[in-house]
Structures are given as structure tokens and as C-alpha cells.
Image (cartoon, coloured by chain):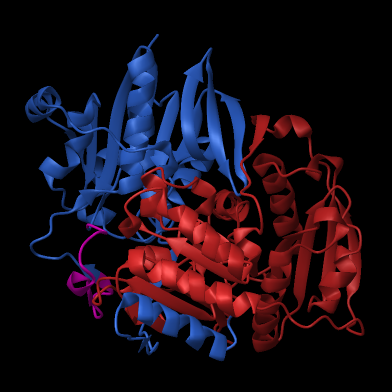
Amino acid sequence: MADATGILVFGDAPGGQLGATAGELLAAGRSLADALGQELSIAILGADVGDAPQQAIAAGADQALAVTSPALADYHPDLHLAAMQAVAADTNAGIILIARNNEGRELAPRLAFRLGVGLAQDCLEVAADAGTGRLLANRPVYGGSAVAVVSCNQSPQIAAIRPKTYEPLEPDAARAGTVVAFPVDIDPAAARTRVVDVVKEEAEGIKLEDARIVVSGGRGLGGPEPFAQLEELAGLLGGAVGASRAAVDSGWVPANQQVGLTGKTITPDLYITVAISGASQHMAGCSGSKAIVAINKDGDANIFKEARYGVVGDWEKVIPALTETVRELTQS
Amino acid sequence: MPVNICVLAKQVVDPEMPAAAFRIDSDARQVVPPPNIPPVVNGFDENAVEAALRIKDAQDAAVTVISSGTAFALDVMKKPLSMGADELVLLQDDAFANTIDAFLTVQMLTAAINKLGGFDLIICGRQASDWDNAQVPLGVAETLGMSCITLGKKVDVQDGKVVVERLAPDGYDVVEADLPVLVTVSNELGQPRYPTLRGIMAATRKRPTVWTSGDLELSAQQLEPRITLHDLFIPERNQECELIEGDDDADAARKLALRLREDRFI
């Protein structure tokens, strides 16, 4: 595989439109391709990928492969993996980027092991050394307390990129690129696991990931009841309510409200934390916020090292007064 | 036939240690274990032990815990036994130090699993709190050719298949597969049980099986590193926090709201 060349990213096309993380991967891949003087390709997987290939070229790809099979209509790790393996073998890319989203958490490690190569996991930043062709990846470890710089020793070099760390490029409809039909023959019987039920537990109102303002509560709230006060504040601000893992583990709020390394990654304009200490594992899910507000009675809490605004005080006094003032400001 | 269950568990530095105790040896590119804070069993791996024991509570099952590392604190690693697991297998060798390279760890674990004759069900924590790699379980499944279900919050075995409630961003999916299967679990599974006094006594009497690299017959190709670690550092934080003060907490809160309005956040 010494002659492996080119950058390959994987994407999807929900509803025939290029998926959100694919645009982020193309931005990361474009910078690598330019640094190395190589081509950037995207493999878009689905039963019907619609306009996504053209959108991918506008978003930075030199080549877009429409990797289609009826078996790829819904996400199934075994079937998607088979398609990815076929594309990796056919394109012989030197570098492969995969989003570390819900699907990529499964697909990236499995593809790496199937190919017998290393995976730089959960990367915040990737850079290429033009001399050696080596991909250097910065990835948080120890819950975000440290950063490791790693590279892969074999080809292809594979990196999983944390969502929302790269901004998609501004779409340029004039960009030139080729669209290649890449039908794959995937046997649905290769799926070894079966989804027998899908249970939705979506919180009402604005989705946490989409909210411009998020109010989160932590262990220091002491119970589930105070979250009603956070809901009231978030409601006035047109925002959503999140929580630390401690609050989820205590059963105060549903798991899908967890923000952090193993919960949701959010990038709101304003992130108001209430009685959250700011452990690195929590910050891993919210450090992309434009501004963080810390409300905590412990002035030494780590959250004050991450916050732009802080109030050292008792949330039971702070939240009602904050809520009332916000009500006056937003309704006047 | 009892369900033959394996849990993969890792010894890690305590992630709950104070931030000030977290130190890095830049030259060695490794975290310095804090001197007075004992290591722990990785939290998600304790969830995995709990998942296995819940199956054992309900039906005939045997639970073997396997761990790979260099220097084990035996009293720490015996915790799964005191919770109720049956066997402990420690893969202990200086050759097992490079755990940022998930590929190497998987070679050791799969060699041990094969040597033990394989399992109906392997349960793993979703990731370890040191390198946060979240790769070893998936690598074990790939290497052994097992079906794989990730991010379980509930794991049941019935009629030769495993049924898992798998976390999804907006709820959960119920996923099933025929045994043998590898399942990863997350903290949403619920708190691991506390060891009982009886369990602790029983664990004290149990001796772990200890294997070194020589016992596992790994080839040079298997031991070829896949990942190079170039640097390890503690990221700098440049955020200046503007502390909003007032006559009392409520006054500070009002001033905070006004400041946020002034800066056009609300």
C-alpha cells in the first residue's frame, strides 16, 4: 500500500442532502489535501444520495463518490462497514477521515481493525507533514485533562474527527469536481444485529444541540426539582436545558440531556452552568460555546477557569433573581 | 448450559482525583500516577461487571473478568470478584504498557480470550477514562469475528440471543443478535453494586490467573505498533473569568443578567 495517495472522507446524505458532519470533514480534508498536494474525495453512503455529491464538491471535494445500495437506506454498522471497506480498497486512499458521531463511534474503530491499521480517535485537529505525508492528530485524553499528539504508523492513516470542531467551508457552486457513481453490492443478510424497536424520548421544545442558549445543572443542585427552575429560565431565553453526568447518573434528568465527553457536544452562543464543577469530561462537550457563565458557590471550582462570566454564590438565591431580571429584560 | 460471560476491565488512574494532582512526565509522554491516590477499575468497566452480574442474577451464568496491564493493584482489580464475578485473569507484562495503541491491547486480550476457549457474551465499558480511545471493544469484536452492539443501557440474554437497549441521541433502540456477541455499556446502565462482606471474603480467597506475553504466543506482526505518541501535554486555558459581584447573591445575579444583555447574549 506504499503508493496509497489521496484524502478520503466518509459522509451521508439524510433526505438527499449532504450530512452536517460531512461538511466538517471536507473542511478538515481540504486543508490536508492542499498541504500535501493531493486530491480530496468523499464517499457518500446511502440508498439514494440525492444532491449531496454536488453539495460536497461545492463544500471542497475534488471527487464525490455516490456509494449506493438499497441495503444502505438505514444505518446498520455491519452493512455500512462493508461499503466503507469496499471504497477504501478501491480508492487506495492514504488518509481517511471519519466523523466521530454516533455512527462513527462504531464505524471508525471497526474499519481500522478490519484494515489492520491504527486509528487516531476523537481528534480536535489534524495536520499533514508535506515532507513525510504523515498525519499528525491532536486528541484530548484523560477526559480532556491532557492532549496527545499521535500519528498512525501504517497506511491508510485513519482519523476520527470530533463533531463541531471544524467549520464547513462556505459553499462555492463554481468549484469543479467529478461525481462518480459507485454502486456497491451489499447483502442485507450480512447484518448480524437486528433493531426490533425504536423508542423516542425526545425532550419537548428546542433540541439541546440546536439551542443558541443552554442552561445546565449539575450535582450541586441536589435533586431533580431545581431543574424546573432551569427550565423556566431556559424558556425565557428561548433555550434548552442540559445536565452534567452527575445529574444524569443520579436520575434527576433523562440521559439524552447529558452534555459532555460521553453525552452531547453542544456549541451554543451562551452556556449557563448552574452548580456544575466543570470537570474536564463535562467541558469536553461544551468547550465550543462562545461564552460560558459559571454559577457555583465554590469559587475554586474549575468551571471558573473556563467561564467568561462568573457568580460565586448560592444557586438558590442566584437563579430566582437571574430569572426575574431576564423576565424583565426580555419582556420589556 | 450456563451463559459464559467475559468482562474486559482496565485499571486506570482515578479520574476523580483533584485537578492539581494530575501531572504529566513530558519526556516519558505519560501521566504520572498520583502517589497517594490509588488506581481504580475504569468506571464504565464497573458498569460492564454490573451488566454481567444482572444476567447472572437471573439465570445460570459464569463471569470471567480479563484485564491487561503492567502493574496491577490486586486489591483494586479484585473488586469485580467481590461484586460477584467468578474468575479474574490478569495479563501482566511490561510489553502491555502502551495502552494508547488499542491495536496492541486487542491482540493481547483476544489471545487470552481464545486461550480461555471463547465466550458466549463479552461485555465491555464503552471507553476507558485514561486514553478515551473507545476502540478496544470494537477491535476485539472485529478480531474475533463477533457481532457487536455498542452503548447498551440494558443487556438481557434469552433463548440464545442477547437483547440490548442501545442509547440513541433521542432515546434508545432495542437491538438483538444471536450469541456470541460483544456488547459495550455506558453509565446509563445504572450504578454498579457494592461488594458485599461475603463477596469480599470470597474474593480474598480467590487467586487470579496471571499470564505474561510469553503465555499468549503473539507474533511479531501482531506486536508491531500501529500508533506513535509524539507529545502529551496539559492544554493551557486562557479564559479570563469576569467575576460579577453584588451586595448579595441576588444582586450579583441581577448584575449578571444586565451584563449579558449589555454584551448582547440575551
Q: Nearer the viewer, residue B110 or A149?
A: A149
Residue A245 at x, y percent in the picture: 40, 54
Q: Is residue A127 left or right of residue B17?
A: right
In the rendered view of the protein, which quadrant contains the N terminus of chain A? bottom right
Residue placed at 21% from the left, 56% from the top? Answer: B94
Q: Was residue B15 drawn as part of the magenta stretch in this picture?
A: yes
Residue B33 visible somewhere in the drawing: yes
Tint applied to chain B in the drawing: blue
Residue A5 at x, y percent in the picture: 69, 73
Residue placed at 87% from the left, 57% from the top? Answer: A16
Residue range corresponding to the magenta coloring: B14-30
Q: Was residue B224 drawn as part of the magenta stretch in this picture?
A: no
Residue A221 at x, y percent in the picture: 34, 57
Tint applied to chain A in the drawing: red
**Tag count:** 0
Q: Nearer the viewer, residue B240 or A49?
A: B240
In the image, is residue A233 above or below residue B125?
A: below
Q: Is residue B196 left or right of residue B183?
A: left
In the rendered view of the protein, which quadrant contains the C terminus of chain A? bottom right
Q: Is residue A9 left or right of residue B75?
A: right
Q: Residue furthest top?
A: B1
Residue A154 visible somewhere in the drawing: no
Residue placed at 8% from the left, 62% from the top? Answer: B36
In the image, is residue A252 above or below residue B200?
A: below
Q: Is residue B17 left or right of residue B245?
A: left
Residue placed at 16% from the left, 36% from the top? Answer: B78
